Image (cartoon, grey):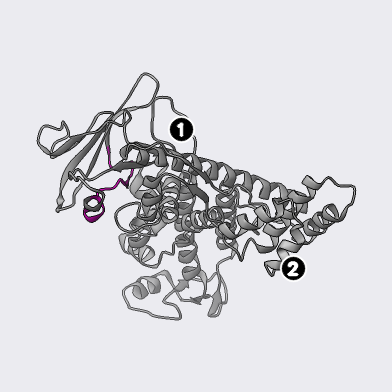
Amino acid sequence: MLDYEFLKNSYLGIGGFLDGSYIEPFPRETHQRVLKRKKLAINVNLVKKIVNTITGHLFRKSPIRKIESLAYRTFIENVDMQGTYIDTFMKKVFKLGLIYGTVFIFVDRPSQKVKTLFEKQTFGVFPYAGIRLPTHLQSYKLDRYGNLDSITFKEPDPENRYISIYRTFTKEEWVISTDVHGKNVISSGTHSLGIVPVILYSPMQIEIPGSILSVPFILEIAQIQKAVYNLLSELHSVLRDTAFPIFTFPIGSPEDIEKLEKEIMTIGTENAIAYVPQGSARPDFVAPPPEPAKQILENVKFLIEQAYELANLNFKGGVQKSGVAKEYDYLEFTKMLSDFAQGLEETEYRLAQIVSLWEDEEFKGYIEYSKEFTPLDKEKVVKTLLEVINNPEMPREVKKEATKLLQRMLFGDFLDEQRLNELDRIIESEDDFEEKLRKEGLL
C-alpha cells in the first residue's frame, strides 16, 4: 500500500520533513541527541523542484482550443464553480497526477430543475468538474472491457468536516449517502450519459491489469529526498562534533580521571579528553579526520544526481557530460514532456465529451497541447525559410507554408492565435500577400 501522506509531505515539505519524524536514529543514539538532530534537520525539497520544473516546461505555452460546442465553451471559463479557468485546472490535475499517480476527475451537474435558459444561468445549473485522489477512493467496479462500471469516493461532508459522506457514480445514476452501501441517502439522481462520469488521469502508464491506480512519478524521488534529509542531518551532526579541535591534556594517574568525571568542566566547545601519558606530554588540540563528512557529502551529491536522472532532468548541471550526451538527455526529457502533453490532451477531450453529454450535445471542437519542446536555433531557421521564400524555383504552395511558419516564429510571442490565423489567411489568399502585409502595417 502506497503511503500517500508521505508523497504529499514530500512535495509540500510538511509532516515528517517539518517536525523531524522522518529522521532515522543511529543505533544506541540517545533520545536527547535524536531530538536535537530533528530540530536542526534541513529538507532539500527535490520533489517540489522537479514537479514544478516539469510543469513549467509543459505549460509554457497554453493549449490551442477552437471550441464550437456552447456547453464546453461555457464550461472552460468556470470549470469547478469557483471561477477556475481550464488551463489552471488541468495544470492542477497534472501536478497531482505526478504526486499521487492517479487523479479522478468527476463531472456532475446541479440537480435543480430549471425551465428556461435564464433560470439556468441564474442558478448556475451547468456541468462542473471536481478532483478526487486515491486517498478518497473507497471502491470501484469494472465492466468486462475494463471500463468503469461504478465508483465510490469517501470524502468530508462540506457542511461538517468531521463527518464523512460517500459519493457514488454509476452508468445510470449518482448517489450521495452517509454509509458506504448507499442506503442512508442524502441526495441522488439519474442521468442518461451511458457512462460513469469520472475520468482517470495518470501521467504514467498503469501497468497492473485490473488496477486503476498508477505508481506515482515521484515515488523514488521522494524516497531519495528522505535519504538526503537523513544524510544531511548526519552530516550536520558530524560537522557540529568535529568542526572544532578537541582539547587534550595529560594527567598524573587514572584516579585523576575519575575525579574529573565528577566535576563540571567546560573547555572550548564543551569537549575535552584527559589521558595518562606514557611519557612526557603537554596540553594540545586534536581534530577528527574530515573523511567521514566528505563521504556523506559525496553520497548526498550522488543521490541528488540520481533524483534528476529519474526525472530526465540530468542535462541540468550535475555530472560533466559531452555535448552529445547532454543533447541525448534533453531529447529524453522532451520526449517525456510530449508523452505528458498527449495524455493531458486525451484527458481534456474526454472531459469535453462528458460535459457535452450532460447538456445533450455532441462535442465539436479542437484541442491541442503543445508537443514541441526542443529549443530551435531561430536565426538558422529564419535564414532557411527566407531562402525557401526567395527561391524562384520553389513551388508557390511551399513558399506559402514557409511564410506562414516564418510569421509565427516572428510574431508568435506577441500576437494572439486569432490574429495569427488572420495572417495565415492573408498568406493563403491568391492576391499578393506582401501587399496585404504592408496594408496591415507588418512590412
Q: What residue is disc 1 on?
A: 206
User: In the rendered image of this protein, does residue 54 appear above or below residue 413?
Assistant: above
Point out residue 274 in the picture as x, y percentages from the top left corner. Answer: 45, 73
Region of the chain picked out in magenta, as a range = 120-137
Earlier-in-chain disc, 1 versus 2: 1
**Residue 333: where, in percent of width, then height?**
62, 48
In the picture, the disc for residue 293 is: none
Q: Which residue is mark 2?
A: 443
Can residue 25 be seen?
no
- The picture places residue 167, in percent across and down from the top left corner, at 22, 39
Q: Residues within 10 Å of mark 1 (few under 14, many from 20)?
A: some
Q: Secondary structure at mark 1?
A: loop
Q: Nearer the viewer, mark 1 or mark 2?
A: 2
Q: Residues within 10 Å of mark 2 (few under 14, many from 20)?
A: few
- The quarter of the image holding the N terminus is top left
Q: Is residue 352 above or below residue 330?
A: above
Q: Secondary structure at mark 2?
A: loop
For residue 325: magenta?
Answer: no
Residue 123: say if magenta.
yes
Q: Position of residue 12 (x, y in %)?
A: 39, 58
Horizontal side, residue 37 vs residue 309: left or right: left
Q: Quadrant of the C terminus?
A: bottom right
Nearer to us in this view, 404 or 310: 404
Amino acid beneath label 2: Leu
From the viewer's side, name the closer residue of 257 and 10: 10
Residue 113 occupies which quadrant of the picture?
top left
- Tell me the kind of residue under disc 1: Ile
Position of 414 with respect to 32 (left or right) is right
Residue at x 53% of width, y 44% of height: 340
Q: Quadrant of residue 35?
A: bottom left
